[in-house]
Structures are given as structure tokens and as C-alpha cells.
Image: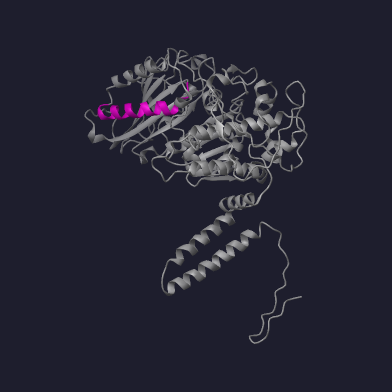
Amino acid sequence: MFIQLAAGRSNRQTNVTNQVEFSYPPLMPAEGHDSPLLPEEWRYLPFLALPDGAHNFQEDTVFFHLPPLSEDRKCVYGVSCYRQIEAKALKVRQADVTRETVQKSVCVLSRVPLYGLLQAKLQLITHAYFEEKDFSQISILKELYDHMNGSLRGSALEGSQVYLGLSPRDLILHFGHKILILFKLILLEKKVLFYVSPVNRLVGALMTVLSLFPGMVEHGLVDSSHYRPKSSASEDPTLVESVSGAEAFVSVSATDIPAAAGAAEGSDRLLKPPSRGSPESSESDWETLDPGVLEEGPKEAGEGKEAEPADAFDPEPGTPITVQPQPAGGQGGVVQGLVSGLEEDQYGLPLPIFTKGYLCLPYMALQQHHLLSDVAVRGFVAGATNILFRQQRHLSDAVVEVEEAGVHIQDPELRKAVSLTTADLRFADYLVKHVTENRDDVFLDGTGWEGGDEWIRAQFTLYLHSLLSSALQQDNERLLADYGVPFVTAWKITHNYRVWFGNKHPAMAAITPGHPFQGQYSVADVKLRLSHSVQNSERGKKFGNAMMTTSRSMVQTGKAVGQSVGGALTSAKSAMSSWFSTLAPPVAVTAAEPPEPAAEVQPMN
């Protein structure tokens, strides 16, 4: 179903609520009403389709999720494109346009998560709709509805369409090693809040992280939006009626707060996205590290046979582990999970993370703030542009500052659980190095398989497959230690692990257990750990800033050089000493008396 939304602003009017202006086909019967009615479960739709602060941007796009209305209880995926125009530029100025600028949103609601594809088409239609300069001309919206449903029906939806506009390559360039920390946070089903403005950057970063989980975007979000609006006591069955038919355009109008929204939901005749082939490793470079002590692992989910240990050898430093895409016929289709209720591949993926009250809300309106503390919500991965969300950090386990590429975690135990092990750092560094190769060459940048978006997703598929395979082995403490003992301990009590481990997945027998980057500790690992600590600790950042100040001072001339360098070196020395003091216990040192100028310096006893 598709929707068009519109909102106007006036300098004289205040205190005006948002409402749906037009829906094609109607969302609900609206006899006796000037505007279409919204189901109670979708009361936040106008605020989602035209986000907070929209008036600060000429145009933008937002992704959001709505609770299901139909009996199949599946998430409704929304994509909204909004723009603003000066009221004096309109050819036909309607009576509700009372402000100097008019903001309107064209919104699409779908049963399939084609965020990027819908966004691309929606931006073109929104531009054409505004170029009419007459918002009563809704025929173009109906034409879009017919075109979109006609083009999607009967054609196979491939992974490339599902991931259009979601680039993990850009995300790794921005977040670096921290991308794996985000991956682990979601595996642990924590309350993760993404924050940045504008909203398109927010939803793009959040959905790109989720695209690293194999099958998650295609099949893993169907139960991710089961919530009820605040103070919603209505149990009227008419509110649970599905938007039948199959398609709709909606226009929403609001005249005070910049908000406007509409929605429409695709029918069951719309094709569902197919499963994506899971790449497998073409090379196996495995090695066992000296492990820590891990709690007794569960018995293998097979027939009780002990898996043969992987061959161990000492690989050369920097030996790449290449993951090639698996042929389409190798993976097989997806089946309905007996416990998870999700469509799963032969490896039991996607993991049932966004189920049983764990929400995925790419964008949250301020009116949805209560969901952060709702007792029925056990966790969430949500995005927000309003600073009030960021200020109330106690309601989230982790706050992701997208602009600064920062991941802020208050709980020290959680920080320990998601901290990267040596093998994790090797894996993350391997990704970063391949992504950054050929960046300076405009002809090669992003064109190869290695370092590209699909290659990155293949690496995370290998990482997750290896983790799951390791969890199935008997006496698996040594295998799981490379993922982090605190992490594995916390992961084993999550809902997604228990559901996955409670089912048999025969295809996992073909996956080699153990961390993809396990191996003996080396000097290169020490350098990598040091670099990671400098970049991510507060004292390390101060040290880096002091060194940058020193570097800038060195290029100055005259007496200013000597003065600036002296001060900068003193700052760098102080910051570095303070930072290194956290790496080792302090040692008591007795200060020596300064020697006399003419005396010979004697070594201290």
C-alpha cells in the first residue's frame, strides 16, 4: 500500500494537530469526515513521515516501521520523502496553507522491506508532485501506485534490490573497528539508540548495520514493530482490520508542527524477497589460541557425536581469508521456523533477534518516547533525531553517536562483554584495510569484489556462521574464547541463542568451527591493540590530540615555533604518561637529587 502525506505551516496558527488528507485506497472508512481516518495503532504515522526538525532541511527521506494491522501480524515498512516549498510559489493556494512555507510528505507503506528501491522511486515522484505547484493534483500519486505494484508483482526480488542504498563499506570507513562492537551489541539484544541528524543519515546507518546479519532485512524484521501506542485502550476489532485490497496512496496535512504522513500497505500478492545466498569460505586458515576458562558449553545439537577438531597451523601474518559467494543452488530455499516463526535458511538464519518484544524502529518520533521504558519492550534498536532521546541515556544500554562514530556504554560489564578480542581486532582490521584499498583511485574505488558491500556482508556471514558452529561443538571453550568469554556467556542467555540452539540445523555440519582469525599472538597484535586503545579510550584520544597539536606547531616559524612546540610537547608528554599509567600498575620510584654542575653523575644503587 502506498501513501502521500502533506503538511502546511502558518505564522498565525498554533496548536493544530496532524491529520490524513488523502488516502488511495482509503486506510479506513471515513464517512462524515473530511479526512481519512487512521487506525489507532498508526496514530504516530504523521510524526514518523515528517520527522522532528524537518523544517531545517529542504528535502529528506525517512524509513520507519508500523505495527501490523492484519491477522498475519507482520511489520509494515514505511518510506517517506518530504520536501518544503514557499507558499507564494504555489499556483493554487488552498485554504489550509496559512504559512510562508509548506511541507509535505509522500509516503509508501509496504509489506516487503525494499527501503532503497522505494526511496529511489519516491524521490522522483515527490519532485514531480511539487513541480505541479498544486497539491490538489493527486492523479500522479495514483499513477505511481499503479506503476509500483505493476512493476513489483510477478518479478523476483533479489538481494541487490533489498540492499539498495545500504552500504556497509561507507559505514566501515566511518566507524572502523567499532562496527563489530555494534554487531555484538545487537546479538546480545541490548537497548541500542542511534542518534544523528538529518534523519536519512540516521536510518541509513541503522539499517546498514542490520544488513550485516544474514537474512535479517529480508526475513528477520517481520515481528520487529509489535507495540501499542501510549494510553491506547481500544480493543475495537474495527481497528485491527487490515488495509485490504492491496495498495494505497495517502496525503496528510498538518499546519503547526512540521508533520505529515500517510500510508499504504501492499497485498499478499506482492512478492516476498527471496533468500540470499550465504557465502562460504574458500580457504581455511584456522589456528587455536591459548583459551580462557569458559562455562560448560551445551551439548552438540546433532546426534551427540563429537566434531573433529580443525587442523591448526601457524599462518603467515596477514594471510587473507577470502569468502566467495556460494552458488544460488547451494543454499536452498527458506522454510518457516517452528519456534521463531521467521522464514529461515538451512543454517537457521536470520537469528530471531527482533521477536518477543525486541523492537526495530529505524526512526522514533518524540511521541513514541514512552516505548524506551515500556515494560512490554525487552529491548530495541532505534533511531532518533531529537536531543531528548540522547540526554536520557539511562533508558538505553548503548547510545551510538553517528556523527562522531562514537559508541557510549555506561555499564562496565556490558563494555567488557562487547570489547573486541585479539581475533576480533584482526577481523575488523582486515575489513578496514580491504575497504580503504584503492580509495585514492577514482577508477578502482568500490568496483572490486574484495572490499565491496557484498564482500563485507559475506565476511560477517562467515563470522556468524563460525560463531554458531563453535557453539555446537562439545568441549568448545577453546573455540569460543576467541569471541570473548564475557560476550559468549551473555549471548548464551539471549532469546535468539536459545531459540536457534533449540533446533537442529544439519547444514551447520559443513561450517568449520572456530574464529575466522584465530591464531598465535604476535607483535602485530600488540600494535593493533595499542592502536585500537588509542583511538577508543578517552586518554588515548587526548594523547592523539596532543600529538596533532605538536605536528601543527612544527610547521610554524620563528620564536613562535619554539614556544608552541615546547608547550605542545609538554602536553603530549603529560597525556601519554597519563594514558600509559592505565596499561600497567604504578611502580614506586624514588626521585634522585639533581647532580651538581661540576660533579660526575653516579648511577643510583
Image quarter of the N terminus: top left
Q: Is residue 426 magenta?
A: no
Q: Is residue 445 left or right of residue 9?
A: right
Prevailing SS of the magenta stretch: helix
Q: Nearer the viewer, residue 25 or 98?
A: 25
Residue at point 61%, 21% (across, down): 346
Against 491, residue 39 (above or below) is above
Against 121, residue 406 (above or below) is below
Q: Is residue 161 left or right of residue 351?
A: left
Coloration mode:
one colour
Residue 396: quarter of image: top right
> Residue furthest toward the left?
91
Q: Position of residue 450 (x, y in %)?
A: 50, 36
Span of residues in magenta: 112-134
Q: Nearer the viewer, residue 54 or 534?
A: 534
* Total numbered labels: 0
Image quarter of the C terminus: bottom right
Q: Position of residue 478 (x, y in %)?
A: 74, 38
Q: Nearer the viewer, residue 295 or 386?
A: 295
